[in-house]
Image (tube, grey):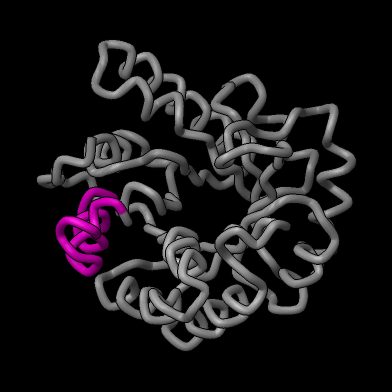
């Protein structure tokens, strides 16, 4: 069964904000992604509003519901974000730790030290029927600890796997990812993944990790879209989620 692709549209919002107007539109991009076969839309709303804004979250939640795909809202543990997730009853809320000054998400939650704090955020959302997930580093022995937070899924941080591509170290990182996925499944948790996944490294996960349910991809997909178009890029990533090799444009 193919992995669900959820397209992260933060970079569309970032480009729009650079001109202070309405173009490019995350709304238009969202429809294009669904038309090309994406099964979900993702936004990570940061407190500084440097890309996604609250209005974008509301817009894309409505589009996802209208088009029959899932909407995944990502972000930290600030009250306004969790409140918005509850109000909109998003399909999935992915809790991601944020370090001041970071360029992008680059680490997972520290368990069990932060378990109680995470549980306090997730419990009301679980009660509202929102599927909850947390972002974790790819450490197999830590995966079972996620169950105590109340999360229903874990998004495994895939930067170490992506960074190892195409060096010989990639097999060790793939094996580590597979061990994490097996540990999560054994603990009764769903498996998501994200960060630096691309047309180069994604097909292997599609073929070799049967536990993997969903990937959230933004940067690499939208870089590829600059060269081959958004519809073609999303379609290529959908194929890659099924384990198919695709021809990727040169992005380095």
Residue 219: x and y in percent read 39, 49
Residue 36 image-quadrant placement: bottom left
Position of residue 185 in the picture relative to residue 251 (left or right): right
Instruction: Point out residue 27 in the picture as x, y percentages from the top left corner.
Output: 44, 80
Which residue is drawn at the image coordinates 46% and 40% (left, top)?
195
Residue 16 percent across, percent down from the top left: 45, 70
Secondary structure mostly taken by the magenta-highlighted segment of the chain: helix
Q: Inspect this view and state whether residue 41 appears.
A: no
User: Residue 175's quadrant in the figure?
Assistant: top left
Q: Is residue 236 magenta?
A: yes
For residue 7, say whether it is visible: yes
> Residue at image x 54%, y 70%?
71
Instruction: Judge from the rendering whether residue 175 lies leftward or rightward of residue 132; answer left or right.
Output: left
Left or right: 177, with 240 as reference point? right
> Any magenta on residue 82?
no
Residue positioned 43% across, 27% down in the render: 178
In percent of the image, x 62 and y 31: which residue is there?
Answer: 107
Q: Which of 170 and 52 is in front in this view?
A: 52
Q: What stretch is highlighted in magenta?
A: 223-241
Horizontal arrangement in the rendering, residue 14 relative to residue 197 (left or right): right
How many labels sit on residues?
0
């Amino acid at each position: 069964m193919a992995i669900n692709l959820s397209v992260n549209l933060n970079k569309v919002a970032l480009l729009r904000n650079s001109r202070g107007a309405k173009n490019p539109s995350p709304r238009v991009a969202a429809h294009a992604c669904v038309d090309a076969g994406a099964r979900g839309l993702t936004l990570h709303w940061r407190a500084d509003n440097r890309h996604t804004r609250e209005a974008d979250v509301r817009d894309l939640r409505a589009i996802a519901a209208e088009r029959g795909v899932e909407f995944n809202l990502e972000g930290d543990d600030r009250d306004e974000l969790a409140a918005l997730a509850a109000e909109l009853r998003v399909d999935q809320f992915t809790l991601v730790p944020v370090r001041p000054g970071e360029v992008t998400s680059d680490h997972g939650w520290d368990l069990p030290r932060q378990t109680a704090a995470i549980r306090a955020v997730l419990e009301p959302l679980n009660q509202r029927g929102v599927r909850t997930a947390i972002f974790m580093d790819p450490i197999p022995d830590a995966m079972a600890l996620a169950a105590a937070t109340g999360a229903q899924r874990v998004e495994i941080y895939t930067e170490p796997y992506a960074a190892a591509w195409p060096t010989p170290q990639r097999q060790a990182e793939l094996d580590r990812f597979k061990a994490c996925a097996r540990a999560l499944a054994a603990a009764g948790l769903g498996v998501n993944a994200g960060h630096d996944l691309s047309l180069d490294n994604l097909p292997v996960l599609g073929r070799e990790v049967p536990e993997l349910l969903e990937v959230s991809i933004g940067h690499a997909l939208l870089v590829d879209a600059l060269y081959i178009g958004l519809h073609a890029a999303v379609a290529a990533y959908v194929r890659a989620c099924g384990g198919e090799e695709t021809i990727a444009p040169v992005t380095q």
